[in-house]
Amino acid sequence: MNKPAVLAQLQAQWRENPRLRYGGMVIIAILGVQGLLMLSDRVHARRAAYAADLQMLSRLEGLRKETVWLARAKAASAQLDAVTEQIPEVAGKGMAQAESQAWLTALAAEQKLGEPRIKVEDTVEVEGYPELWQVIARLEGTLPAHGHEAFMRALSDALPWVQVERLEVAEGDAPRVVATFRSYYRKAVEEGAAKPARGDVGQDRAAPRAATAGIAQ
């Protein structure tokens, strides 16, 4: 059967069958309503996105007019310099390792650690802080009975130049403790020499900070 005959037959059925016409109109109406609903959803979504963009633009414009941010940045820089000044100053890599060894030895003695063992690694520079050295060290020993609190307080007193990277404390009244430290030291600056630049205020960098992480019991 060729196409003209098929089309003629369909047209004849359309004219002679009211149900077919009604059904076709209902289908067309449903498709039209669905299309309008989809279009309406897209319009609402675009309106919401436009309103959000306007709100963000308004906030950014308000921030641009603020003058307090520069003062805050200067205050933060001053605070950072004050904290940095508290970090011990050393003349070289070997001195940084010796200082770390001495501090850990004193810590073990003050806390009365049993069978203390200290291992000091190499001294390396701090990324983003060319004026600083960092030393990784490890301390092992047995805490005295009920010595947890005093040991944790001693670690806190080392702020801001000692960071406890990992601390493992076994169970019991006199547990075995294993601590990994990252100690920071300022490079000694000769008189008349300029300090190394740290970069602009607000630059994204990993600042040295004292923290206790990875405590496992």
Image (cartoon, rainbow, N blue to C red):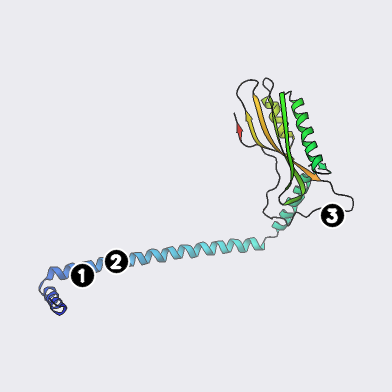
Picture quarter with the C terminus: top right
Q: Quadrant of residue 88?
A: top right
Residue type, numbered disc 1: Met
Badge 3 or badge 2: first in the primary sequence: 2
Percent position (x, y) of residue 2? 14, 78
**SS state under label 1:** helix
Q: Secondary structure at mark 3?
A: loop
Which residue was labeled with disc 2?
Answer: 33
Q: Earlier in the sequence, mark 3 or mark 1?
A: 1
Q: Amino acid at mark 3?
A: Ala
Where 79 sits versus 52, above or below? above
Q: CA distance from mark 3 to mark 2?
A: 75 Å
Q: Nearer the viewer, residue 140 or 36?
A: 140
Query: Are there few (<14), some (14-19), or many (20+) residues within 10 Å of tag 2?
Result: few
Q: Within 10 angstroms of label 3, few (less than 14), some, or many (20 or more) residues?
A: few
Q: For this rendering, which residue is in front, 118 or 190?
A: 118
Find residue 82 and report its horizontal and vertical position in percent. 78, 46
C-alpha distance separating marks 3 and 1 = 86 Å
Identified at 54% across, 62% down, the residue is: 55
**Badge nearest the viewer, 3 or 2:** 3
Which element is circle 2 on? Answer: helix
Residue under the image location 30 percent in, 65 percent down: 34
- Which mark, by number, is residue 84? none
Q: The N terminus lies in which quarter of the figure?
A: bottom left
Q: Is residue 36 visible in the rendered structure shown here? A: yes
Q: Which residue is mark 3?
A: 194
- Please give the residue where the numbered disc 1 appears in the rendered image: 25
Tell whether 74 sits left or right of 25: right
**Amino acid bearing label 2:** Val
In three-dimensional space, the C-alpha distance between marks 1 and 2, rounded to whole angstroms, equals 12 Å
